[in-house]
Image: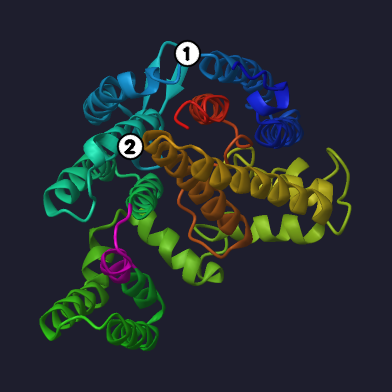
Amino acid sequence: MRVNYSLQDKFDFLIFIPLLLLVVLGLLGIYSSTINHPTANGNFERQFIWAIVSFMTIFIIYSLPSQIFKNISMPAYAISIFLLILVLAVGKTVYGSKSWMNFGFVGFQPSEFAKIGTILFLAKWMSEENRDINDPKTFMISISIGLLPVLLIMLEPDTGTTMVFMIIILFMFFWKGLSLFEIFVVISPAVVLFASLFGKVTMFISLIIILLLLVIFKKNIFTNISVMVMNLGAGFVFDIVYKILKPHQQKRIDAFLDPMADPLGAGYNALQAKVAIGSGGFWGKGFMHGNQTQLRFIPKQWTDFIYCVIGEEFGLFGSVLVLILFMLIFVRLLNLSKQTNDSFGSLVTIGAFAMFFTHFAINIGMNLGITPVVGIPLPFMSYGGSSLLVNSAMMGVLLNFYRNRRLYD
């Protein structure tokens, strides 16, 4: 018997409407921060055109047969790897990272496209033949698929995008069924490394916590010793890693630990962003009436620091509205990942969730001064055509999965 589904059942408005509102808020922030700018007053028009193209892309991808995403996953991954290699050879260096390529008047970052290619191909590989991620062979091949673009992006170098890829891989492995202990083994060195930023005392506290968790996991003595040695190495290797980093990356770490150490240099953007958000009050200073925004205290405020434009001109109300809209999207994506009975679609959905959530968390943290400034844009809001197009394309895929979620019942 044929069942006729309603439009609401075929199209997830609870994803699309928050997405639409975020793009509109982003356009308002870009307009306000660039309209009186001597060199960026055309950015709003360009972003508006990209927004139209992006929404057209969403509906085109939404209408495609669902099987096409599996079919294009390997070519998409191969092309993304090729572009990541190509950008190392002929790419344009921006803020110390050789991550941009130009085609005529259009510039884009291959790492943005690589996110989709990697998510699709990794999901296809792990979902085929009922593969078990805890099987050593499957795990090694899967981690190789994920880490190849990571290694190429590290060569640019682009620390922020590297972090995004690592979290995407981790989320997809967890969703596939990687054991909690193995996830703990992967995460714990990063936690100790991060804790070592704040000094030896914080590092040793993190090591004690890890030791207690090892007791809870009840593994054999050899495994426990191996994990502790690995974490000890991570804690004491920070000084070595710090020296390898580029000077601008070192300054970002120093500014994160103490923004006042260089208030006119590396710590300037973070300090000014907090001033802008804090000065907005509850309702804000009004559209195009923010002092920090209109007087251009933050360079290129329309990119990574678009959130502080919203915070200053629309106040706490606008800031919280942005958070609520993102939370609605995240909740819907988690629900979709459970509703989609196809393993491939479920893995792609959780990978996209990880991508959007990581960008969101790091960018908002940058604006509030609680995460380092690593050049991560706010999805759907920050200025950037390639970023908006890629994020919208991924949303088109997810809306397609929603439309076809019953195909595998």
Main SS, magenta region, reads helix
Instruction: Please state which amino acid type lies under the numbered disc 2.
Output: Ala
Q: Residue at x 36, y 71 (%)?
A: 191
Q: Which residue is mark 2?
A: 123
Q: CA distance from mark 1 to mark 2?
A: 34 Å
Q: Residue at x 33, y 48 (%)?
A: 169
- Between tags 1 and 2, which lies in front? 2
Q: Is residue 218 above or below residue 356?
A: below
Q: Is residue 104 above or below residue 364?
A: above
- What colouring style does the render use? rainbow
Q: Is residue 313 above or below residue 6?
A: below
Q: Residue at x 74, y 56 (%)?
A: 277
Residue 356: horizontal and vertical position, in percent?
52, 43
Q: Quadrant of residue 66?
A: top left
Label 1: which secondary element? loop
Label 2: which secondary element? helix
Q: Which residue is mark 1?
A: 105
Q: Quadrant of residue 282?
A: bottom right
Which span of residues is magenta-colored?
177-190
Instruction: Please state which amino acid type lies under the numbered disc 1.
Output: Phe
Q: Is residue 179 magenta?
A: yes
